[in-house]
Image (cartoon, rainbow, N blue to C red):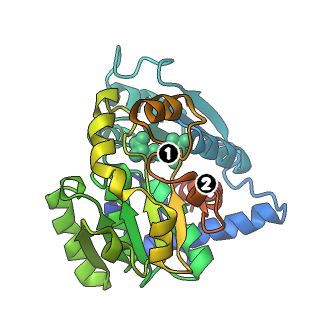
């Protein structure tokens, strides 16, 4: 693997990265994963410190940044959604300058993409996007590492995304798939297709990489021959509870079920960034499920728990890929 220098770069969205840089981060993550498995310590950022800002809740992203930070030998400070002055008493620009004077890198999870971009503008140290409404770039690195582990390649993979494709996951997967020369299909009602300006930008990228981009409302033709069937929650963090009713009504035909997986083909796998409403064992899952008479939302429990589901490999890969992003942007 040829080294690509990314020292000092922010990681805000995949649009800012070349296919070679994305591939490099994925391969670096695979190397770090192998080292971790072999018990080889790699405290390659010893003496550095990072700040993690979370304006929305998290399990995977927070834990990934923390564990990756510890493995790299760094000190880690977690700022929870209520425990700092950000936004309420202090601007993002001021926060950026304060944190950048003390820390070597800053992670941000929150609302608009413009907030993380603003943070990066005023920060002299790398800023990493841990999820905004528009993009979730570290998740896509983990997803693509998982695809590469499973299929041995990214180029030419038939990747189908079902559900609400207008939000962070649909947007980021579309950008990533176009960058990496994949065949990306959105299978959803037309109202849930990504924003036209982003689609146009992705089409240009696809023309250069050989990727294809398909949008369809038809589940049968949309999922036929898929290597990967992927979905996400129908209601994302920060959206009001009231939208559940319309989402369920619109997106129920696009839930990932056994029929969808069988139609995709024998070798198709199921992916989901998690958390997922695949049963009624969570507070929200139970409340919404009972109210609307459903046993699951975006994926059936049968598919989620099946051999075709690689969601927990995908979740583990969050840590290895986030470690790669931090290592690459913090060191020579
Ligand atoms: N996939 C993901 O970002 O999970 P968390 O919300 O738990 O961080
Ligand atoms: N679209 C989801 C992703 C969670 C990781 C959300 O924003 O809540």
**Furthest residue toward front:** 293
The answer to whether one can see residue 54 in this image is: no
Q: In which quarter of the view is residue 238 placed? A: top left
Nearer to me, 261 or 33: 261
Residue 307 on image: x %, y % = 66, 67
Quadrant of the image for the C terminus?
bottom right
Residue that carries the numbered disc 1 in the rendered image:
296
SS category of the residue bearing label 2: helix
* Residue 209 occupies quadrant: bottom left
Cβ of disc 2 within 8 Å of ligand 1? yes
* Badge 1 or badge 2: first in the primary sequence: 1
Nearest the eye: 301 or 95: 301
Please, is residue 193 above or below residue 244 in the view? below
Of badges 1 and 2, the one in the foreground is: 1
**Distance between the Cα atoms at labels 1 and 2?**
20 Å
Residue 156, image x and y in percent?
Answer: 42, 85
The residue labelled by disc 2 is 315
Vertical side of 80 occupied by 206: above or below: below
| Crowd band around label 2 with a 10 angstrom C-alpha radius: few (<14), some (14–19), many (20+) | many
Q: Which residue is drawn at 52% across and 53% down?
A: 300
């Amino acid at each position: 693997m040829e080294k690509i220098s990314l020292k000092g770069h922010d990681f805000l969205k995949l649009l800012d990265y070349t296919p070679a840089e994305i591939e490099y981060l994925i391969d670096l993550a695979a190397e770090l994963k192998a080292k971790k498995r072999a018990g080889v310590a790699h405290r390659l950022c010893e003496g550095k410190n990072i700040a993690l800002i979370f304006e929305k809740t998290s399990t995977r992203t927070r834990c990934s940044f923390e564990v990756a930070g510890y493995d790299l030998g760094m000190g880690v400070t977690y700022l929870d959604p209520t425990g700092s002055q950000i936004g309420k008493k202090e601007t993002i620009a001021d926060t950026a300058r304060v944190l950048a004077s003390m820390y070597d890198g800053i992670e941000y999870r929150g609302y608009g993409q413009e907030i993380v971009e603003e943070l990066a503008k005023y920060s002299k140290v790398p800023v990493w996007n841990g999820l905004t409404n528009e993009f979730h770039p570290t998740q896509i690195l983990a997803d693509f590492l998982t695809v590469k582990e499973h299929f041995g390649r990214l180029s030419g993979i038939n990747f189908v995304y079902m559900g609400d494709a207008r939000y962070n996951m649909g947007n980021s997967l579309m950008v990533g798939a176009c960058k990496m020369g994949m065949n990306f299909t959105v299978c959803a009602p037309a109202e849930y297709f990504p924003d036209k300006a982003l689609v146009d930008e992705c089409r240009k990228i696809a023309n250069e990489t050989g990727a294809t981009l398909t949008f369809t409302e038809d589940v049968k033709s949309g999922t036929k021959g898929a290597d990967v069937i992927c979905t996400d929650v129908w209601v994302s963090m920060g959206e009001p509870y009231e939208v559940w009713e319309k989402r369920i009504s619109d997106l129920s035909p696009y839930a990932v079920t056994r029929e969808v997986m069988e139609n995709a083909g024998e070798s198709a796998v199921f992916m989901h960034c998690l958390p997922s409403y695949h049963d009624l064992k969570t507070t929200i899952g139970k409340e919404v499920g009972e109210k609307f008479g459903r046993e699951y939302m975006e994926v059936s429990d049968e598919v989620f728990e099946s051999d075709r589901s690689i969601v927990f490999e995908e979740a583990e890969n969050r840590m290895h890929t986030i470690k790669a992003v931090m290592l690459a942007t913090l060191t020579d």
